[in-house]
Amino acid sequence: MASKLKNLSTYNAKNLKVKDDTIIGIIVSDWNEKITHSLFDACQETLLKHGLKEENLHTIQVPGAFELPKGAKILMKNENVDAVICLGCVITGETKHDQYISQAVANGIMNLNVVSSKPVIFGLLTPNDEQQAKDRAGGKHGNKGVEAAVTAIHMVNLKDQISKGERKIGF
């Protein structure tokens, strides 16, 4: 959970391992590229650190945050990925534009999660200003790219555990 009380890059790495055949996609927005590319770098580094093979990482760049869900859908249609991570940044402006974009992206990613059997990870920063974005893209609050990578690994592993009958969740 992103907050000023928690460093996003702090997590329990124990038992966090990517299986050899795992394939993960990352969709990254070029809008606010200093921020989003910092998120991407941290995300990629975290996935590789935990065992993802470089050749099993597929990346698509899209113009802005609004295009993240469509980029994810295109990747999921054309590559046999186990999870997709969407990374972007929408900074509050003088109008309500940021609210419309953020809500559309959140809805688009949620819809993909509902209709797909693959996890689609929400890695969209929605800060009030550029400094808050920097604080969450490698600054004093860590890097949400790390959090997104860790979430993807957990979700892929959870799906594998449940499909193998290793763990049941109340049903």
Image (cartoon, rainbow, N blue to C red):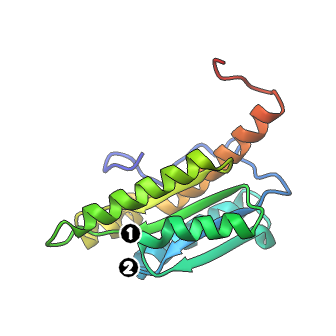
- Tags 1 and 2 in contact by the CB under 8 Å rule? yes
Q: Which residue is mark 1?
A: 89
Which quarter shows the N terminus? top left
Task: Please provide percent x and percent y for residue 68.
Answer: 50, 68
Q: Residues within 10 Å of mark 2 (few under 14, many from 20)?
A: some
Amino acid marked by disc 2: Asn
Task: Please provide percent x and percent y for residue 116.
Answer: 64, 50
Residue 127 appears anywhere in the view: no
Q: Residues within 10 Å of mark 1 (few under 14, many from 20)?
A: many
The residue drawn where x is 56% and y is 79% is 61
Residue 99 appears anywhere in the view: yes
Q: Quick one: SS at disc 1?
A: strand
Q: Which residue is mark 2?
A: 32
Q: Which mark is residue 138?
A: none
Q: Is residue 64 above or below residue 96?
A: below
Q: Is residue 160 left or right of residue 138?
A: right
Which quarter shows the C terminus? top right
Q: Residue furthest front?
A: 115
Instruction: Return the disc, 1 or 2, that comes first in the chain's sequence.
Output: 2
Task: Please provide percent x and percent y for residue 88.
Answer: 44, 69
Q: Is residue 61 left or right of residue 92?
A: right
